[in-house]
């Protein structure tokens, strides 16, 4: 059955925007739209995407041109739906179902049930409480950070359309800052720095920094620049919200404790599990990505012990995470992103980003430059590690496939 160019592009763009809203990479979004359009007969497809916009033009039968523009103002991470949309696009390319059937499946995916509310709140508590202890806080600091995150997460679940994004982030940070101080005032927590450091991980865009640099290094310069600017603006809002109440409480907000390696590994398990739940990963993937987070964190710690270099340590951890994700993707028939995003979370420089902006706002320029340097090296390490490991893995995988096919042919 032949379809009009407008019909083909409508369906392809709908899936592309949904992928973008789930946190898919720009390259995946552009490739998906291209493959779907060509599967239904488009002879030429041009796609340009950034986090907030997709523009596509297709040519059908050498004479019909159609261009469509779609705005996207809702960017989050939803790994379950990302996996479903990815499988649907593969099905389209392989089986070419009717566009009506594709639209029905898109609606089914859109209306899938998320984890229940109790489990989501448990994920928030595990993620923030785990990170509070991960950074050097006590168990009481971890409990306090988890309770503060419940209030922040409740606000985050409100409709973002009610607020400007900057205002929405700022209010969430004010809530987190206020209740972090309250937790210390009433004696629930021991150290404000670690309570805040754990609580802000639920909103800090540390992952976006690494992603933006990876996009820039992959020649998606505009997309990477947009992500980077969004992360900086969000960080300023977060730092402003927490800084206000930190100043009221008094004292420096610093992290200066050395944490035992086994505590780091244990809390990285809880933090990874928590974020995997928040990001709506599949039940069957939760244990895998949690263990993966521990393995990658162990690689990071071991390298840090040998080199004492943050760039090399984060790069090695990211390479391990990428290779594991690529292997799991082929074994479990899922996008590598589903495994990669949660497993690199233990060494995403979220707290460092917060302290950098906090020191800038408070005029502590020496500490600001130190945090800025560390943040840049860590983010670059993530980007280089992911890109380098992906290239190496693809070369090895193609070589193995070629040798295997040649052996099968000879046999």
Image: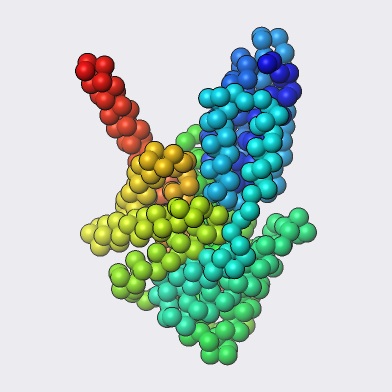
Task: Pick the residue in front: 315 or 23.
Answer: 23
Residue 131: quarter of image: bottom left
User: Which quadrant would residue 358 be assigned to in this image?
Assistant: bottom right
Q: Is residue 297 left or right of residue 69?
A: left
Q: Residue visible at 38% across and 44% down?
A: 328
Q: Residue at x 40, y 69 (%)?
A: 267
Could you say which is closer to the camera, residue 396 or residue 239? 396
Relative to residue 86, is residue 7 depicted above or below?
above
Q: Up-down: is 262 above or below 98?
A: below
**Residue 252 x %, y %:** 50, 79
Residue that sits furthest to the bottom in the current view? 186
Percent x, y of residue 361 = 59, 68
Q: Position of residue 89 (x, y in %)?
A: 57, 32
* Residue ID at (67%, 62%): 157
Can residue 134 be seen here? The reply is yes
Compared with 33, 344 (above or below) is below
Point out the image quarter for the N terminus: top right
Closer to us: 97 or 351: 97
Q: Which quarter of the rendered picture does the C terminus lie within?
A: top left
């Amino acid at each position: 059955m032949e379809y009009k160019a407008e019909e083909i592009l409508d369906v392809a763009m709908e899936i592309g925007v949904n992928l973008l809203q789930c946190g898919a990479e720009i390259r995946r979004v552009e490739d998906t739209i291209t493959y779907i359009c060509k599967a239904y007969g488009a002879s030429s497809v041009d796609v340009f995407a950034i986090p907030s916009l997709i523009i596509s033009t297709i040519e059908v039968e050498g004479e019909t041109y159609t261009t469509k523009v779609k705005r996207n103002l809702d960017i989050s991470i939803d790994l379950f739906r990302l996996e479903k949309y990815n499988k649907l696009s593969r099905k389209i390319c392989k089986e070419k179902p009717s566009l009506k059937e594709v639209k029905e499946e898109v609606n089914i995916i859109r209306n899938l049930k998320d984890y229940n509310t109790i489990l989501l709140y448990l994920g928030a508590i595990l993620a923030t409480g785990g990170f509070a202890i991960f950074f050097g806080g006590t168990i009481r600091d971890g409990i306090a950070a988890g309770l503060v995150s419940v209030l922040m997460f409740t606000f985050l679940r409100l409709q973002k359309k009610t607020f400007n994004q900057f205002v929405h982030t700022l209010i969430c940070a004010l809530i987190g800052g206020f209740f972090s101080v309250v937790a210390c005032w009433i004696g629930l927590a021991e150290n404000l720095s670690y309570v805040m450091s754990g609580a802000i991980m639920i909103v800090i865009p540390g992952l976006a920094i690494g992603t933006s640099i990876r996009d820039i290094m992959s020649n998606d310069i505009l997309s990477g620049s947009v992500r980077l600017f969004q992360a900086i603006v969000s960080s300023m809002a977060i730092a402003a919200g927490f800084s206000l109440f930190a100043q009221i409480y008094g004292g420096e907000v610093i992290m200066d404790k050395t944490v035992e390696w086994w505590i780091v590994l244990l809390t990285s398990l809880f933090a990874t599990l928590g974020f995997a739940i928040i990001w709506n990963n599949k039940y069957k993937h939760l244990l895998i990505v949690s263990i993966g987070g521990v393995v990658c964190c162990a690689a990071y710690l071991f390298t840090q012990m040998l080199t004492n270099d943050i760039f090399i340590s984060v790069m090695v951890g990211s390479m391990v995470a990428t290779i594991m994700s690529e292997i799991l993707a082929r074994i479990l028939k899922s996008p590598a992103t589903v495994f990669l995003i949660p497993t690199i979370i233990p060494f995403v420089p979220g707290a460092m980003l917060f302290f950098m902006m906090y020191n800038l706002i408070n005029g502590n320029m020496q500490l600001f430059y130190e945090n800025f340097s560390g943040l840049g090296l860590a983010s670059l390490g993530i980007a280089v590690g992911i890109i380098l490991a992906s290239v190496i893995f693809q070369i090895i995988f193609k070589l193995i496939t070629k040798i295997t096919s040649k052996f099968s042919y000879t046999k």
